[in-house]
Amino acid sequence: MSGRTHLVTGAGSGIGAALVDRLHARGDALVLLARSAERAAELEQRWPGSTTLVADLADPASLEGLAGDLPDRLDSLVHSAGVVALGPVAEAPLGEWEHQLAVNLLAPAVLTRLCLPALRASRGTVVFVSSGQGLSASPSWAGYAASKHGLKALADSLRAEEAGHGVRVSSVYPGRTDTPMQEAVHAHEGKEYEPARWIRPQTVADAVLHVLDLPGDAQVPDLPVRPRG
């Protein structure tokens, strides 16, 4: 399938960049969210022909200003951006909780609401790229896991609400993936980083593409993706 239009967050690196590579290569139209004009210029240069929108996911209210710039039709909205800050609950400052909840949960909720008219027009698909921590929380991951558990609740509720409009909603739960975020996590944990042990971002991107390309008679509500071994 080609000739479709996708809005993707988190295109600058990791899973988001791998997905945009795939979509761009097959000729789909891309609308990419960037946190600054400088970042937008970088994305446009990397993927010629793409359209960029500037807003800071850490400030969900800033997304409201995008309402007049969104396409009339969207075949998909893929939430791939995310942040993580590790630490035990006893030591986690309020700012880290607020930042993770803003980027990982509140911003996707606001952006999804803004995009729903365009998604309904195309009977499109919303994909939340979550995390294994969105299904089971580990020590020192409370803030991040809470935001991803909330994202699952958002997806589940949205799926039921939008069924009558033909909008499909999927959550993808990657395990540890070879991304800059994962490298930073290892540094925090004091562990040696071995990229070959973890899922390639291209593999997760292929899983997202499977969800996007699924025939219209079905949807994938939840798709865990785990490292082999």
Image (cartoon, helix red, strand yellow):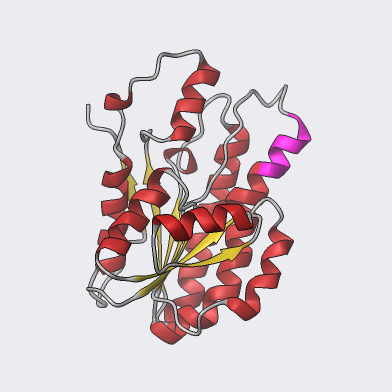
114 vs 131, left or right, is right
Q: Which contiguous range is marked in magenta?
A: 93-99
Residue 98 belongs to magenta span:
yes
- Inspect this view and state whether residue 9 appears: no
Q: From the viewer's perspective, is residue 168 above or below residue 193?
A: below
User: In this orientation, which residue lies closer to the viewer: 173 or 197?
Assistant: 197
User: In this orientation, which residue lies closer to the viewer: 26 or 121?
Assistant: 26
- Inspect this view and state whether residue 111 appears: yes
Q: Main secondary structure of the magenta part?
A: helix
- Residue at point 28%, 33% (across, down): 227
The quadrant of the picture occupied by the C terminus is top left
Q: From the viewer's perspective, is residue 138 above or below residue 67?
A: above
Q: Quadrant of residue 89?
A: top right
Q: Position of residue 42 (x, y in %)?
A: 50, 53
36 vs 153, left or right, is right
- Residue at point 64%, 80% (across, down): 68
Residue 82 belongs to magenta span:
no
The quadrant of the picture occupied by the N terminus is bottom left
Q: Position of residue 202 (x, y in %)?
A: 28, 46
Q: Position of residue 217 (x, y in %)?
A: 24, 77
Q: From the viewer's perspective, is residue 171 above or below residue 75?
A: above
Q: Position of residue 28 (x, y in %)?
A: 32, 71
94 vs 161, left or right, is right
Q: Quadrant of residue 36?
A: bottom right
